[in-house]
Amino acid sequence: MRESFRRLLAEKCAETDIRRVMASPGGHDADLWQAMANLGIVSLLVPEEFDGIGAGAVEMEEIMEEAGAALLAGPLLPSAFIAASLVSLSDDADAKARLLPAIASGQTIATVAFTGDTGTWSLTDISVTARPQGNVWVLEGEASFLLSANLADVLLVFARTPDGVGCFEVDPSKVQISPLVSWDPSLRMSKIALSETQAVRIAGVDSITFEQLIEIAVVALAGEQAGACRRIFDITVEYLKTRVQFGRPIGGFQAIKHMAADLLIEVESATSAARSAALALATDAPDKDVLISLAAFACADAFSQVAAASIQMHGGIAFTWEHPAHLYLRRARADAQLFGQSDAYRERFVAAMEKAA
Amino acid sequence: MMNDAKTLGDEVRVWLAEHWDAESRRAKSGGSLAEWMDQVVAAGWAVPSWPAEWWGRGLDKKSVSLIVNEFRKVGAPGAGQDRTNITANSVMQFGNDALKQKIIPEFLTGRASQCLLYSEPGAGSDLAAVRTRADLQGDHYLVTGQKVWTSGAQNADYGLLIARTDWDVPKHEGLSFFIIEMRQPGIEVRPINQITGDSHFNEVFLDGAVVPVENRVGDEGQGWKVMQTALAVERLVMGDGAGERRQGSSKNNVVSLIDIARETGKINDPVARQEIAQAMAYRKLNALNMLRAKQEMAQGSASPIMSLGKLAMSRILHEDARIMTKLMGAASMLDGPEHSLAADVNYRTANAYMTSIGGGTDQIQRNIIGERVLGLPRETEADRNVPFRESRAVTG
């Protein structure tokens, strides 16, 4: 499947496609999405009983490496991986039967609201409140940095309830969705405001589910970062072999060659970190906390560092809008914020190591 | 293929069960380690990828991995030396038959040990600039010159020696590779006092030392190529789990960043915690990289990741020492037995250079990665096409 996905992306998600989709209002390529659904990419994490492939974190991470390399944007991460995982993690048979097959087919796009304005993706950051009113729930408050909410048919909104954190299915048409201008033009982010909004509670989602969902999101994103980081590095190394100055390819100069050697360590480390986190998540390994928090900051930092250095190593050509290097920098800077910053994960990592020591 | 692998696995397990006591980790026949190795060599497990007439079984890489794994499971030594034994591999690949018969069994059974006579005071990073000369006199060469950074020289039976046999061709082309007996009057070994206070390394002075022609490995002028093969084996051995083994280079191997932070009361300092996390992450990432490299190699594909291990480890060791020093604060100025923690941190600070200089400096390592892994253009060398006699290495 990874091979087929790579071929599909090479064909339909080349740089010109990325730029075309980037400039489109929805930031989404419906044809590519349908082709991905046909390949089983969209239904990858959905259990077989709900028309999915029933794969796990390892396969998800592999797919995200490919997606990241191609700078794919759109609902793959928020809908097919994050929202589908959330519904699967719940105890809600109705919600599963209603939502999972629709998400798996790609017909329904869902997205999760799981952070407020501070953008820390932590429980304390949830600023929507929910109160029961007869048979329904009523939601109040705001959430931000939603991915692909502009396309969403379903919003899954985390909120504080009288009995702790819960999650609610919300009809997007009943919510004020404000698009956010993103520095990465391939991403579509939104803020939502809920006021007396009626919603259906998804049973069996609590603060533990929230943390589990963050783990899945982090591992998926780590895969994207590892894949993207490797691709922009490869693009850069190729350029170093062909760009001639002072009568020889610039990759022959130690100032450049040594940068490349150091960056290769970061690229390989990102791949190792993302894959081992995925395996730890899939197998519920005892050192899962260590490996997932490690992947969170190691992959974010590697991608940021490599993307930034790639512009410097290319020189003037990469300072132009037409060159793809800045697209990777934009994605790297966005990815470094999504689901929590590196410093926060470094702290979690050292805390987990401390426990083990 | 599946069946073959299963049969081979069975064969190894049966053989080990017959000959090796996993519980006591000893040969069932008793005897010395060398006597155990005799059995391993005779059975063809020591160098399985070599031909049957040369102690092997003519097997592929995957099969060697399988054999090594079976040996590892029961803690039996000696298998898979076709990947690790520097001398045996160099001699097997380039030596004449007489030398193979004479040298290889001694090394496969661990009866003989070697030291590496490569670097010289004038040939460090630029190893091909060696000026130790080997002059042919009838059926032997007379070797004169100075080698440096030789570990284990006092106890070694043989030295793997690179020396110049032709001064009228460019530097790489005039070298030859020898296996020289270390215990002879023409060789003097003097320990080097290191910045750590240790003396792991030696200078070796050769003054008319004798090496028979049959101990030349490869033809005259082929020395550089032979040494590259030996270095490749050495790097593979070094990169393989370098991380955790090198940690043991500290004098008292009890301290970790977390231990020191606890002891110095900085464990809750958020700035210190960020630095500690990053340093520990470097170590963990390198271990994960090496694990992945091994998995890729076990599947038969060459992994470029292995070559990154040394450079990565150098950053790990220097960063560890830097952060430990910061945690220690003013106490890091102290030393000696009454302040063993400071002494340990100081030792680590100095010893980190062993990895960032030894076996190729970080800078040379970056050249190697850039050129051999990434395929970037080679460094220009002013003396590459000049007869060595006329190069600055000789004329000054």
Image: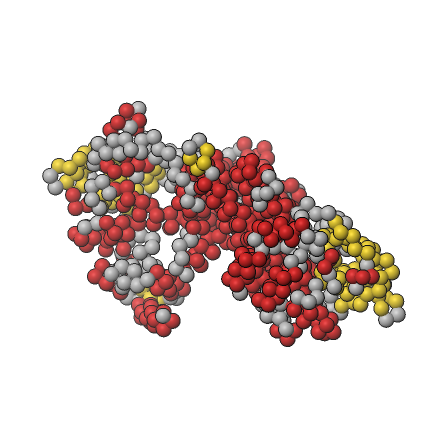
* Apparent side of residue B267 relative to residue B29 in the rendered image (left or right): right
Q: How is the image coloured?
A: secondary structure
In which image quadrant can residue A283 be found? bottom right
Look at the picture and state if B326 lies above or below B245: above
Residue A208 seen in this snapshot? no
Q: Residue at x 60, y 53 (%)?
A: A17
The quadrant in which residue B43 appears is bottom left
Q: Residue at x 16, y 43 (%)?
A: B213
Q: Nearer the viewer, residue A23 or B147?
A: A23
- In the rendered image, the residue lying farthest to the top is B396
Residue B13 placement (x, y as % from top left): 35, 69
Q: Is residue B160 left or right of residue B356?
A: left
Q: Position of residue B270 (x, y in %)?
A: 66, 43
Is residue A148 placed above or below A37 in the rendered structure? Answer: above
Residue A135 shows up from this direction: yes
Give the total of numbered labels.
Answer: 0
Most foreground residue, A231 or A123: A231
